[in-house]
Amino acid sequence: MSRPSPVSVWCERVIEGGWLLALLLIPTYFNLLSARHFEPDKATTLRSIVIIMLAAALIHALEKISTPRPPANGNGDVNSAPWWRRIAAVPLAIPTLIYAAVFVLATVVSVAPLVSFWGSYQRLQGTFTNLSYITLGVLIALYLRRRAQLDRLVAVMILSSLIAACYGLVQHVQLDPLPWRGDVVSRVASTMGNSIFVAAYMIMVLPYALYRGIIAMHHARSSQVSPPQPLIDLGWGAAYALLALAALALVFAAMMFGAVVRAADLRYWWVYPGALVVAGGLFLLIALAPHRAERLTFGKLIPGILLIGYVFLLGVSYTLGQGPNQRVVPLEGRPGVEWPLWLGIATVLMAAGYALVILLPRRPDAPSRLSYVLEAVGAFVIAALLLIATFFTQSRGPWIGGFAALFVFFTLVIVLALRRAHRDNPERVRLWRGLLIGEVALAIALGGFLAAFNLSDAPVFQQLRDVPYIGRMGRLLEVESGTGRVRWLIWFGDDKAGGAVGLIRSNPLRMIVGWGPETMFVAYNPFYPPSLTSLEARSASPDRSHQAYLDEIINKGLLGLISYLFLLFSFFALAWRLMTRLNDWGLQVLIIAAVAAVTAHAVEGLTGIPIVSTLMLQWVSFAVVVSAGGIAGMYRLPGMPPVQAAPEKVPASPGSPTPDNAIRSSRTPKDREPEKTTTSARQRDGRRTQAVRRGSSSGRPTASRTRQEGRAAAIAVYAVILIIALLSVWAFNVDSVLADMRLQQAQGYIDNPGGRLEQQIIGASYLLDAIRMEPDQDFYYLTLGRSLMTMVTLRADEARRNGATLGQIDPNASVATLLQLDDTAALQSFVLQRTPMELLSYARAVLLRAQQLAPLNKDHAANLARMYNFWYQNLSGGQDREALMQAIEWYQRAHTIAPQDVAILNEYATAVARSGDHDQALTLLEKSRWLDPLYNDTLLRMGDILRTQGKFADAVDHYLMVLERDPRALDGQITAIAAALSSDPDQMKRLRDGYLSARSSRPDDPQLSSIIGLLSVRAGDLETAASAFAEAVRLQPDNLEARQNYTIVLSDLLRYDQAAQQAQELLTLASQRQETTDQQRAAIEALLGYLRQRASDG
């Protein structure tokens, strides 16, 4: 066999480095500088890695084709078979191809093909990302050819999980430097921002950690090597522990840095991912086990050099960056400013670990029993950390998935051990049978307890349900409240809409092919159960059903579900076949770990959402099993070289030593037979070679020159492939992340409640940058449109203050014009030169572009309706009826897209009422009330329309129903209501009495007392008004408005002494307020003088 070229060797290194980097970065990476932080950033990272791996694989294939191969042996070559037969011979190839083909089909027929392919803004889990998972698995299966590679993969996977597990524990003990919005103490979220997500990931890594621990203990028990110097093995164990701790300390330092060091730009984007890469290098050093190497190579020093370089670069960057654009913002009660100390700790730990690595003697021979014990201890410690962190997530779905994984893992391990004992060690049969019976009995007992815990109302179980953490397992069947109710409504809907099941049953054709990946967000709207609005945000629309198998049907139809189940069944069948036919105990347990990991994912998916990390691990587990079979000689994978048959060896039992690199199977496939080369054949080859060498000397330079030209052309092709790959990474992934980082910067300006026009302009400038990077992302246009509407409001207020005109609509306004404004100064000049109506024209153009990009998104139609409604009410003063008609038209479109959205329906009804059609408006509101009887806004709007019609009694009836649910619901319009009811004092008193009843449940609310006072004044009941205002002043002595009203009412009651006293208090308070003008102070002084005069007059 020909020796691989340097290009081939480096391609294989890049591919292996890619999957190791993915196993490190995807679970641990998040981006504080982007708006989405977690899942989309993980998806783009994975896609980038896979693109580079795919480019390396393509170069490797071309290099292999261009490299001369020796003639095929007489037995034939497996590569000479037809291509389709070679593909079919690869385990899991057919199920994988079917699964991928269904994904592509569902994308082609999707209701939103672009979203299905690229992925939604919120998750980025489209076909592109899913094909990346598949490609990662395929590349691992094709290029993982040696046992050492398999060991590295598992070791890096396990060590990388330390970051997620330990960060979760840091959150639980309240030492998290990052100020997350949600509760990450009682339910840790770690590096994934969601407690369910991180638990779902950790339960998939857990079986692999148990595998390493069990195999190490097996080797320790069977090892015959006793360490002559135990301190050496202990030293190596300490070295690895120090390196792992150095990696964790470095990552923690990077988190602290990101929490407290604030910069106006993106200069420190590299700090956290850089720390992860350096930590990954230290983990890889541990995985390479330098204590078993004959010598210490330079490559093993690179992780330490990288750590020192990282610390130096961060220190220099921070020092040089000092200035107004960089500041340190300590967070009260959180660590962060100590990040230099933790960098020093990481450096010291690394140096100590490397010192031991360099100074300790190496053991390239058979490892000792103690070294295996230490390896087992390390694996079991990691497993324990994963279990503890999973427990602190309080995520019941992953808990059940973890229990299922542990049951599968230990059951299969014991079953295989029992089989081997029957064959090789009969005296241990009883032991293994007893363990199997005990393990199954324990599982049945736990299952029975769990059933009783959820079904029984016995006092002991009722008390247990209130115990923190454990109590959640007693509420698995609760569907009347909490997350159980949310899932039930999403799955089955309510009496108004059918939920996910209703969506699936609504269209037989779509039931087969699906609505398209990532389209539930828009497809689900007509089936959204209004009852869900009382449990989640009213504007929210589920993009996942929280049930992976329902999601398969919604996204890809029954074809998708069947293809996925076929893939799972094929995987489990392959794993069982390999487990039962292999004699290599280490590979058997590894396959069991992969099966347990996939089982955890499959079970957790019954109530969860597959995420980037778990989907990646699923395909990695598929590839691990396929590669394990190829390494063991059960079949020959493409690109795998023929292996000479090893002498027959006695199969090992669980109690006998089995080297890690042993290759044993119960059969030897024909395609693994050694090639036979006869002496005569070698002689013919030799003569042929000599004949070539004796050829014409003039031909040798020509042939050499031809080879050189061909090699140059090949290198050029390889360079083009690499350039295309790098450009693809930038265009399809990096650009997306940078655009989202621009959005994050923009939100810091446009979401500021007290923001001025200048801040909106800066934010809009960042948004324009984001749109230039991602011109097809509708969410960026939506946000820019919102910012422009805020600018319109600010400019209109300024124009009214200055007595300027609001201008006219610009018919030529376009998004392209805005995109030509390439900096903040240009945008500022543009905004200041436009009238409010001209700016509104550009806001309309931006919102229309968002709607064109995602026409099925209800928010875009609703935002256009709100824009026209704002135009009609605020800019035209109710005079431009065409704007109102446009608002009604867009509201109608939004209602058609989302007929169950009562918020949009209510706004639609109000716009119809403004057009004068009150009856239709009330009909729409009655429908809204039927959909969601608990929505107060509906009753309030009905009351307003009835009030407009002069039906005061009916209007007050609705207002009283609103007050029973929320006594503060009318605050914003109580003045207008009181003015309208002035002509009907009886209804005014009814409303006042309703407030008196509401105050009985909230006696300490000063605002309710003030409203009672206002309504009492309008109803002519000054005594009640005085009592109410007196109570308001008592509850809120510094309230100038309440004290002023109290003063006036006292004056109207002719209680001038008390009124003068309150006026004096009012003047004192007003004098202490800087915002009080001289005119206001003078008015109060005049009132005080008047009251004193009247009091003195008697």
Image (cartoon, grey):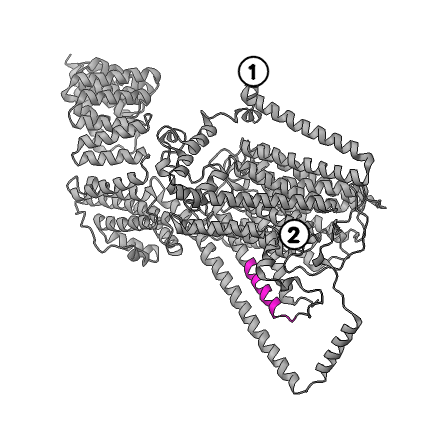
Please name whichever residue, 964 or 180, is drawn nearer the observer in this view of the structure: 964
Q: Quadrant of residue 80?
A: bottom right
Q: Quadrant of residue 1037?
A: top left
**What secondary structure is marked by label 1?**
loop
Q: Is residue 435 left or right of residue 603?
A: right
Residue 559, image x and y in percent? 47, 45
Q: Residue furthest top?
A: 1098
- For marks 1 and 2 on the same chain, the one whose residue lies earlier in the sequence: 1
Q: Is residue 367 left or right of residue 587?
A: right
Residue 436, image x and y in percent? 72, 32
Q: Is residue 131 magenta?
A: no
In the rendered structure, which amino acid carries the disc numbered 2?
Ser
Please name whichever residue, 1007 or 23, is drawn nearer the observer in this view of the structure: 23
**What secondary structure is marked by label 2?**
helix
Residue 869, image x and y in percent? 23, 40
> Is residue 1039 in view from this perspective?
yes
Q: Is residue 718 left or right of residue 71?
A: left
Residue beneath the point at 15% across and 16% down: 1094
For residue 6, above or below residue 978: below
For residue 361, above or below residue 523: below
Residue 627, disc: 2
In the rendered structure, which amino acid carries the disc numbered 1?
Ala
Range of residues picked out in magenta: 53-68
Please name whichever residue, 781 or 305, is drawn nearer the observer in this view of the structure: 781
